């Protein structure tokens, strides 16, 4: 499982001109799932995301998690995170999980985030989405499940 995490001041996702998810302060997550990912991977990454210390303390050091700061998460499915550009000019997406496998894991991942007490908004799995955000910092990280 591969997640691009961006700390944001505000963010939203729109599908066909309608807002499907919107947050103020928190994280935007672009979530990619490969065919080898399991529920254990989703739990691992969700735990890592909610406990990462990416918010500043009184001394300006990144010492607080989203759980401590009370932020929200905007989670957006993103199969292109498993695009392979090594050959040719068109990416191969053979490493990305098929929708019937990826969607339940994506939904379980979001439920894991929620079970930690974080408000989670989402896009629409498989839809063409427009994502807008104000990146805070900017802080952007890649969070991945352990290698198999």
Image (cartoon, rainbow, N blue to C red):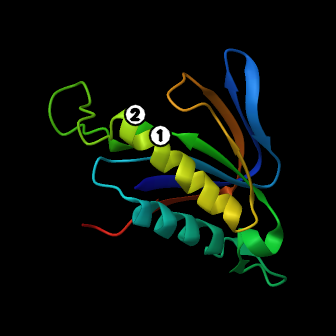
Picture residue at 28% right of the left edge, 67% below the top? 147
Assess whether mark 1 and mark 2 are in contact (beta carbons under 8 angstroms): yes
The answer to whether residue 31 of the structure is visible from this angle is no
Q: In the rendered view of the protein, which quadrant contains the N terminus?
A: bottom left
Q: Nearer the viewer, residue 7 or 17?
A: 17
Asked if 51 appears above or below 96 in the picture, the reply is below
Q: In the rendered view of the protein, which quadrant contains the C terminus?
A: bottom left
Where residue 100 appears, x then y in whole percent? 39, 35
Asked if 63 appears above or below 132 in the picture, the reply is below
Where residue 113 appears, x then y in whole percent? 64, 61
Residue 13 placement, left or right of 77: right
Residue 118 placement: quadrant: bottom right
Q: Which residue ends up furthest to the top in the rendered image?
A: 16
Label 1: how many Cα within 10 Å (few below 14, some 14–19, many 20+): some
The answer to whether residue 123 of the structure is visible from this angle is yes
Residue topped by disc 1: 103
Residue topped by disc 2: 99
Label 2: how many Cα within 10 Å (few below 14, some 14–19, many 20+): some
Residue 35 placement, left or right of 116: left
Real-space CA distance between mark 2 and mark 1, rounded to the nearest whole angstrom: 6 Å
Say which element carries label 2.
helix
């Amino acid at each position: 499982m591969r997640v691009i995490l961006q700390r944001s001041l505000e963010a939203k996702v729109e599908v066909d001109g309608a807002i499907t998810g919107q947050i103020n302060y928190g994280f935007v997550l672009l979530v990619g799932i490969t065919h080898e990912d399991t529920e254990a991977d989703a739990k691992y990454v969700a735990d890592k995301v909610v406990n990462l210390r990416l918010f500043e303390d009184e001394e300006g050091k990144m010492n607080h998690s989203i759980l401590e700061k009370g932020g929200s998460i905007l989670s957006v499915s993103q199969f292109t995170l498993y695009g392979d550009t090594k050959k040719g000019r068109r990416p191969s997406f053979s490493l990305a999980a098929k929708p019937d496998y990826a969607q339940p894991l994506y939904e379980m991942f979001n439920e894991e985030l929620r079970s930690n007490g974080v408000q989670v908004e989402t896009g629409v799995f498989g839809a063409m989405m427009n994502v807008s955000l104000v990146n805070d910092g900017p802080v952007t990280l890649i969070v991945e499940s352990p290698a198999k």
